Amino acid sequence: MAKRTILTEPNKLLRIISKPVDQVGKEEQKLMDDMLETMYHANGIGLAAIQIGVPKRIIVMDISKEEGKKEPKYFVNPVIKNKDQLNNTYEEGCLSVPNQFAEIDRPSKCEVEYLDYFGKKKVLKADGLLATCIQHEMDHLEGILFIDYLSKLKKSMIVKKLSKLKSNTTVL
Ligand code: ZN
């Protein structure tokens, strides 16, 4: 496994619509391994491939809270089948929008069809944090960030802050 660099907003790559994967092979599994390591290292609970610059419809997640108890989940070509009418509000953050958080409304439950790490077709019924997280990650596949749901003013303040941070960082 290898840790990769996480792209942060503003970055045009984060706005790309990711492409479906033809089949889950060695290359895709290696990518998922790298994504998981990168996510754990950054203390994240979800990561989409485009966040490390790969425009493929692949997501890794682990929302287990207990220390030392890893429960990685892999989603290839995920599609949301059913969304609940009821919304849930969570304070969301994103590894590509560092240190920024905001309350976002999303359907409280959803059903997701996807291929797993071995390319097997699966269906997951998600609610709570899992439902929020999968919808947040799936937005990345469409080039959408959680800050896009905020008011124009709030969003532009965050993007400005992040741009400033970037220009102050020396790239080695
Ligand atoms: Zn994110």
Image (cartoon, rainbow, N blue to C red):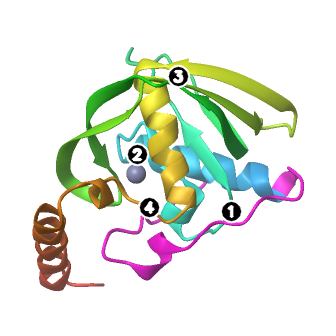
Disc 3 packing (10 Å; few <14; some 14–19; many ≥20): few
Does residue 5 lie above or below 107 as drawn? Answer: below
Residue type pointed to by label 4: Ile
Range of the magenta residues? 1-26
Q: Position of residue 99 (x, y in %)?
A: 18, 52
Which residue bears the numbered disc 4? 144
Disc 1 element = loop
Q: Earlier in the sequence, mark 4 or mark 1?
A: 1
Q: Earlier in the sequence, mark 3 or mark 2?
A: 2
Disc 4 packing (10 Å; few <14; some 14–19; many ≥20): some
From the Cβ of disc 2, is ligand 1 less than 8 Å away? no
Distance, label 2 to label 1, CA atoms, is: 21 Å
Instruction: Find residue 72 and report its image quarter.
Output: top right
Residue placed at 79% from the left, 28% from the top?
122
Distance, label 2 to label 4, CA atoms, is: 23 Å
Mark 2 and mark 4 residues within 8 Å of each other at the beta carbon: no
Tell whether 72 sits left or right of 23: left
Tell whether 25 sits left or right of 16: right
- The answer to whether residue 22 is magenta is yes
Which residue bears the numbered disc 3? 70
Distance, label 4 to label 3, CA atoms, is: 28 Å
From the Cβ of disc 3, is ligand 1 less than 8 Å away? no
Residue type pointed to by label 3: Lys
Disc 2 element = helix
Disc 4 element = loop
Which is closer to the viewer, label 2 or label 4? 4
Which is closer to the viewer, label 4 or label 3? 4
Residue type pointed to by label 1: Lys
Residue placed at 12% from the left, 61% from the top?
154
Q: Position of residue 8 (x, y in %)?
A: 34, 68
Mark 4 and mark 3 residues within 8 Å of each other at the beta carbon: no
Distance, label 3 to label 2, CA atoms, is: 13 Å
